[in-house]
Amino acid sequence: MSRLTTSIFAMTTAALLSVALAGCQSQSPAKPSRPAVPDNFSSLMPPQSLLRDDTIEAASHDRSSSRLAYVGVWAKSGDACAMMDQTAFDGFAVITPNSLRRPGETCSFDQGAAGQGYQQFDASCKVRRKKRKRTIIISMMNSTAMSLSVDGKSQTLTRCHMLK
């Protein structure tokens, strides 16, 4: 090889190496994108495909237009929300504008007054295939907690959320 060929070869090799090594510069590795964790993660229910129709109706109800704060899916804790419609457990309520489902019973009543944090209903309930009249009192503590009283037996429940 002549000196000129050797010199061109060396320059070409150096240029190729510098281009190849330019891609190897130390850069921060891209962080894998993760879906954002929802604010209500601790009170999420199972996916919609696993929920009963009344649960979906209650959870997707537009409370801002109906102004019926009591409508929703409720459980004794955020952890219990994850069990909704999947296993039998005490301490939940699925409430639509005119119905209530709790463990072992379903009730119907006239829709409550819009914009009220306290509601009292005279309900017709089915308990183990028998019809009974019950007094249901709902007292909203805030937008995510309520006190539910059925015939004087009260419990505090937290609102469950459906993943959108």
Image (spheres, rainbow, N blue to C red):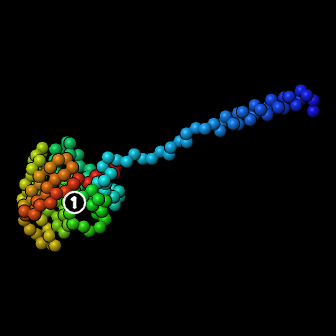
- The location of residue 34, given as percent across then percent down, is 45, 47
**Which residue is nearer to you in this view: 20 or 127?**
20
| Horizontal and vertical percent position of residue 135 | 7, 61
Q: Secondary structure at mark 1?
A: loop
Residue 115, image quadrant:
top left
Closer to the camera, 163 or 28? 28
Left or right: 17 in relation to 36: right
Name the residue type under label 1. Lys
Q: Please name the residue shown 50% across and 46% down the image.
A: 32
Q: Is residue 115 left or right of residue 11?
A: left
Farthest right residue in view: 2
Residue 151 lies, in percent from the top left, at: 7, 63
> What residue appears at the point 93 percent right and 33 percent down from the top-left corner?
1
Give the residue at the far front of this rendering: 26
Using the rendered view, name the quadrant where residue 125 is placed.
bottom left
Q: Residue at x 84, y 32 (%)?
A: 9
Instruction: Give above or below for 16 relative to 140.
Output: above
Residue 162 rendering spot, x and y as whole percentages: 30, 52
Q: Residue at x 24, y 58 (%)?
A: 77
Q: Which residue is mark 1?
A: 76
> Does residue 123 appear in this view?
no
Residue 151 shows in this picture: yes
